[in-house]
């Protein structure tokens, strides 16, 4: 399985930035987010050679529009005696300017595919919460192996068992887990997790970065 849109091993021969919107839009797996618009899942090689395995590319304008709307909605209004409540407003501003993992577009030399980016067809089969704040599922591989996965909120990038990639996934068993004996068991949505269901035993989401781009 070839991971790079262009050969990243030859990046030392490149004289100029290879940042290419067409590659992002045509080659990377993507998902339409109701808030941020289309988000593309890939990786990045920075101008100093650093490789970021998991990067979500998204519209800069959608982020700006959302920030302006949320600032207006929560801007403190003066109360009696001139007092105002800044708590919610401060938290909203903080969420946009002082939180989250971000990488600037001008620091990216090349865009490459990420082996951790879950393909669209698999991601679309993982939907709905299993328990409050948690979704669990099992990947069945083409060789008959089963691997338990789970995430509280992020469904873009995932760790992989040694020797496998997402092309090896034959079936997705949503809202399922592997019992202590290794049997595939369906989880009851909205119920408490079974006693032998260990979230720590799941393959989990990977830490990712966001890159806001003007042209998306």
Image (tube, helix red, strand yellow):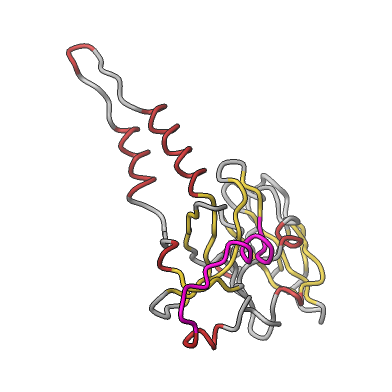
Along the viewing direction, whichever of 182 and 37 lies nearer the viewer: 37
Tell me the magenta residue range.
14-30
Could you tell whether 165 is left or right of 172 in the image?
Answer: left
Quarter of the rendering containing residue 180 = bottom right
The residue at the point 67 percent across, 46 percent down is 191
| Residue 114 position in % (x across, y down) | 60, 73
Task: Write the residue at 70% across / 47% down.
Answer: 189
210 w.r.t. 2: above or below? above
- Whether residue 73 sits left or right of residue 57 in the image: it is left
Q: Is residue 70 visible?
A: yes
For residue 145: magenta?
no
Q: Quadrant of residue 57?
A: bottom right
Position in image of residue 117 (x %, y %): 62, 68
Counting every numbered tag in the picture gives 0
* Rendered residue at 49%/44% (across/down): 61
Q: Quadrant of the N terminus?
A: bottom right
Residue depicted at 20% across the width and 19% down the height: 83
Residue that extends furthest to the top in the rendered view of this protein:
80
Question: 169 and 198: which one is in front?
Answer: 169
Q: Is residue 53 visible?
A: no
Q: Residue furthest left?
A: 81
Q: Is residue 10 above or below residue 26?
A: below
Q: Is residue 21 left or right of residue 69?
A: right
> Seen in the image, is 74 located left or right of residue 191?
left
- Percent x, y of residue 10: 54, 88
Q: Position of residue 47 (x, y in %)?
A: 41, 75
């Amino acid at each position: 399985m070839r991971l790079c849109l262009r050969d990243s091993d030859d990046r030392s021969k490149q004289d100029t930035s290879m940042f290419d919107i067409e590659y992002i839009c045509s080659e990377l797996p993507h998902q339409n987010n109701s808030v941020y618009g289309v988000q593309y899942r890939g990786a990045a090689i920075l101008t100093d050679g650093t490789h970021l395995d998991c990067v979500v590319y998204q519209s800069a304008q959608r982020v700006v529009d959302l920030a302006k709307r949320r600032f207006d909605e929560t801007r403190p209004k003066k109360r009696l005696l001139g007092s105002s409540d800044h708590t919610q407003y401060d938290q909203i501003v903080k969420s946009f300017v002082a939180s989250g993992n971000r990488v600037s577009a001008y620091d990216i030399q090349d865009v490459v595919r990420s082996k951790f980016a879950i393909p669209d067809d698999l991601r679309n089969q993982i939907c709905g919460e299993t328990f409050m704040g948690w979704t669990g599922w099992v990947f069945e591989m083409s060789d008959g192996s089963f691997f338990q996965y789970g995430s509280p909120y992020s469904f873009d990038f995932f760790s992989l068992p040694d020797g496998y990639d997402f092309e090896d996934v034959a079936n997705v068993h949503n809202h399922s887990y592997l019992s202590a004996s290794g049997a595939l068991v369906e989880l009851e949505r909205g119920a408490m997790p079974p006693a032998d269901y260990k979230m720590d035993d799941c393959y989990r989401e990977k830490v990712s970065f966001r890159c806001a781009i003007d042209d998306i």
